[in-house]
Image (cartoon, helix red, strand yellow):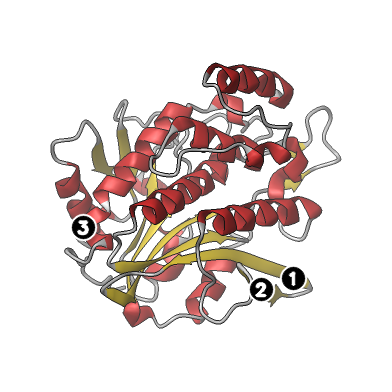
């Protein structure tokens, strides 16, 4: 656990920028960020807060995931998002056996096509604490998937500030991905899939991809023209998107995009993770200090740019047929 060392360096960075110094996590969320850009300080704040020891690995059914849900909901509230459908809070609650589970959802209504929906998602649960272990016992899940949730929050703030999305954007932090995509499966039962234009899922974007700096890859690239739309929109930028290079791992069906794709929604997952050689994957060593915040930030910017024509109603990806 290197959290305290990070906090000291974070305070020095914030001081250098002339900003108010935050308290230690979890009150670090009180730090004020610019609302018009996607910047590394915003991303860093979300990443380190969600993967802090105080979140206890965010396992479903634990106090740790409750803390994470409260943080995400408080950010949706601060940003100014609306509630999903007829919910009274940002939580979409449901039961799975004896467990009370909840997705956290915020909505940014579209201007001219508000009955057409784009989902931007990541899962906020992880593996929790294993007390039988010696030494470090907390599976912080920084890359998997605090990095993705940090991206969702940064994109929510970005698109809210822009205020020009023609389609309605539904920002979702899914629960129970590690337990079999429970949250995204439930979400799929609560929507009219025909009105959902695409699913933009984000998973493990904290490490440089095998294709080099400023690159990411997309699962299920050949299952719709979604990826080609993104590539078109990134032309002229320094960022490139590639098809999933790890076909043998069947990653298209191993993240929450699969729950939406099974409904015919063109839903794919962005990632940079070197999954074939990632020594921190599902280990207690998956901590924020092992990640590159610049890699996350540049990827978030690329997702914003790459999906712009879909969010603004210019492009509509083809439906997925199983």
Q: Where does label 2 land, which residue? A: 93
Asked whether residue 39 is in view, the answer is: yes
The part of the image, by quadrant, that contains residue 78 is bottom right
Q: Residue 196: image x %, image y %?
A: 35, 74
Q: In the image, is residue 178 above or below residue 275?
A: below
Residue 146 is marked as: none
In depth, the one of 303 and 101 nearer the eye is 303
Q: Nearer the viewer, mark 1 or mark 2?
A: 2
CA gap, disc 2 and disc 3? 32 Å
Name which residue lies at 37% across and 32% down.
209
Kind of element beneath mark 1: strand
Graded by Cα atoms within 10 Å as few (under 14), some (14 to 19) or many (20 or more), the crowding at tag 2 reads: some
Graded by Cα atoms within 10 Å as few (under 14), some (14 to 19) or many (20 or more), the crowding at tag 1 reads: few
Contact (Cβ within 8 Å) of mark 1 with mark 2: yes
Name which residue lies at 28% across and 61% down.
311
Q: Earlier in the sequence, mark 3 or mark 1?
A: 1
Q: Earlier in the sequence, mark 2 or mark 3?
A: 2
Q: Residue 294: image x %, image y %?
A: 42, 27
Name which residue lies at 30% across and 30% down.
214
In depth, the one of 208 and 50 nearer the eye is 50
Asked whether residue 244 is in view, the answer is: no
Q: Where does label 1 land, which residue? A: 100
CA gap, disc 3 and disc 1? 37 Å
Q: In the image, is residue 89 above or below residue 4?
A: below
Q: Where does label 3 land, which residue? A: 309
Q: Residue 98: image x %, image y %?
A: 79, 73
């Amino acid at each position: 656990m290197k959290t305290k060392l990070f906090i000291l360096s974070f305070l020095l960075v914030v001081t250098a920028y002339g900003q108010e110094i935050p308290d230690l996590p979890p009150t670090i969320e009180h730090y004020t960020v610019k609302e018009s850009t996607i910047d590394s300080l915003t991303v860093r704040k979300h990443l380190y807060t969600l993967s802090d020891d105080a979140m206890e690995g965010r396992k479903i059914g634990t106090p740790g995931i409750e803390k994470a849900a409260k943080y995400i909901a408080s950010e949706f509230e601060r940003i100014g998002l609306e509630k999903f459908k007829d919910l009274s809070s940002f939580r979409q609650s449901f039961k799975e056996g004896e467990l009370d589970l909840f997705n956290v959802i915020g909505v940014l209504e579209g201007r001219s096509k508000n009955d057409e929906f784009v989902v931007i998602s990541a899962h906020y649960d992880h593996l929790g604490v294993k007390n039988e272990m010696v030494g470090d016992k907390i599976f912080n899940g920084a890359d998997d998937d605090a990095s993705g949730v940090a991206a969702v929050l940064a994109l929510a703030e970005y698109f809210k500030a822009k205020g020009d999305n023609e389609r309605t954007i539904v920002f979702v932090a899914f629960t129970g991905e590690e337990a079999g995509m429970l949250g995204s499966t439930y979400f799929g039962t609560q929507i009219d899939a025909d009105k959902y234009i695409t699913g933009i899922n984000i998973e493990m974007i904290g490490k440089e991809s095998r294709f080099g700096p400023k690159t990411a890859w997309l699962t299920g690239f050949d299952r719709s023209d979604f990826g080609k739309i993104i590539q078109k929109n990134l032309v002229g930028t320094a960022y490139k998107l590639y098809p999933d290079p790890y076909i043998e791992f069947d990653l298209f069906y191993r993240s929450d995009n699969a729950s939406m794709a099974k409904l015919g929604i063109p839903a794919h997952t962005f990632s940079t993770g070197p999954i074939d050689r990632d020594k921190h994957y599902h280990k207690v060593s998956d901590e924020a200090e092992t990640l590159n915040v610049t890699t996350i930030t540049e990827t978030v910017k690329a997702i914003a740019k790459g999906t712009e024509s879909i969010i603004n109603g210019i492009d509509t990806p083809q439906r997925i047929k199983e």
